[in-house]
Amino acid sequence: MNYFIIDDDPAIRAMLIDMIEDEDLGKVMGEAEDGSLVDNDLLALKKVDVVLIDLLMPKRDGIETIRVLSSEFKGKFVMISQVEAKELIGEVYSLGAEYYITKPLNRIEISGVLKKVNERVILEKSIRGIQESLTLLKGHQSPPFGSSHTKNIIEAGRSLISDLGIIGESGSEDLMNILEFLQDQKQKFGSFYILPSLKDIFYGYAKKTLGEQATEAEIQKESKASEQRVRRAIYHVLIHIASLGLTDYTNPKFEAYSSTFFDFSEVRKKMLELEGKSEKSNNQSRINMKKFIQSLYLESKQLVD
């Protein structure tokens, strides 16, 4: 991964370079002391994937710099600042920044954030590569709607899963397999296909996973096990989304995902619980799993259609 650092404090720039190199997160391709010294031609020349940028700088601040660069730069911005004003943080997110990290810098936090950003960049590059390949293929022939589109759906799903904060959860792999199962069914039945019941989704997925030799008892056991893994993963998403809302109610991910994947009333209850304003309870059983899976499938399709 290629980084570019924009910060008027040389000590901060040096610290970030050391962190990136020590954690083997990528290469720092360049640095600048002010946003006015950076343009899209420079970022393109350096093949930059991620820009780490300070909010407050003497000539052109971080917000204005992102506004100027975002018209052409297709990589990711990570804002770093000691300012914690919610209205400024909200504006940073609205311009497309992936994360907002407050100073003083914490090595563990920086490492964790950049690893997530790296995963997102890799996934998006993979999706773009697949889309470009499909475009070239369509230019020579009219292929049937087949496995290449299913692969696209899965890559898009992984990108969303990463955004939702459960890329490492065991249930996330079940969700990817469910996406593949649903897309295969869609291709089989075409426009007549209707998303099946939750029970049928897990049963069909388990049957496909285990193969034709599996007994009914084995299929039922795997179906229930995968349902529990997915339920736990979705519950972790709920906590992640609620935490985003508590940190910044205008966070674009919170605004986009809180009502897309959940009933907002459940998100609000979890926010109150995390604030200590309501009794803590494990409400996994009340999560609308069908809504979450359907939304994941439709959002993934929208990314690649």
Image (spheres, rainbow, N blue to C red):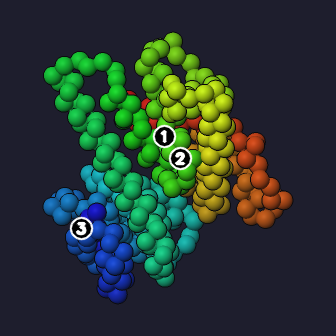
Q: Earlier in the sequence, mark 3 or mark 2?
A: 3
Q: Which residue is mark 3?
A: 38
As helix, strand or loop, the secondary structure at mark 3 comes to loop
Q: Amino acid at mark 1?
A: Met
Q: Farthest residue toward the bottom?
A: 11
Residue 145 at x, y percent in the picture: 34, 21
Mark 1: few/some/many CA within 10 Å (<14, 14-19, 20+):
many
Q: Is residue 150 visible?
A: yes
Q: Earlier in the sequence, mark 1 or mark 3?
A: 3
Q: Tell whether 221 sits left or right of 10.
A: right
In the rendering, at what x and y percent does residue 33 appear? 28, 78
Q: How many marks?
A: 3
* Residue at (80, 59) in percent of width and height: 280
Residue at 66% x, 36% y: name it: 221
Q: Nearer the viewer, mark 3 or mark 2?
A: 2
Which residue is at 40% across, 66% downward?
A: 114
Query: The residue under label 2 is which amino acid type?
Result: Ser
As drawn, 197 above or below 111: above
Give how far apart the Cα atoms at labels 1 and 3 are. Answer: 39 Å
**Residue ID for mark 2:** 172
Q: Where the C terminus falls, by quadrant?
A: top left
Q: Which mark is drawn over residue 176?
A: 1
Label 2 packing within 10 angstroms: few (<14), some (14-19), many (20+): many
For badge 3, the amino acid type reads Val
Q: Say which quarter of the image contains residue 79.
A: bottom left
Marks 3/2: CA–CA distance? 39 Å
Q: Position of residue 141 (x, y in %)?
A: 19, 19
Q: Is residue 7 left or right of residue 277?
A: left
Location of residue 254 with respect to 39 vertically, above or below: above
Q: Which mark is residue 112?
A: none
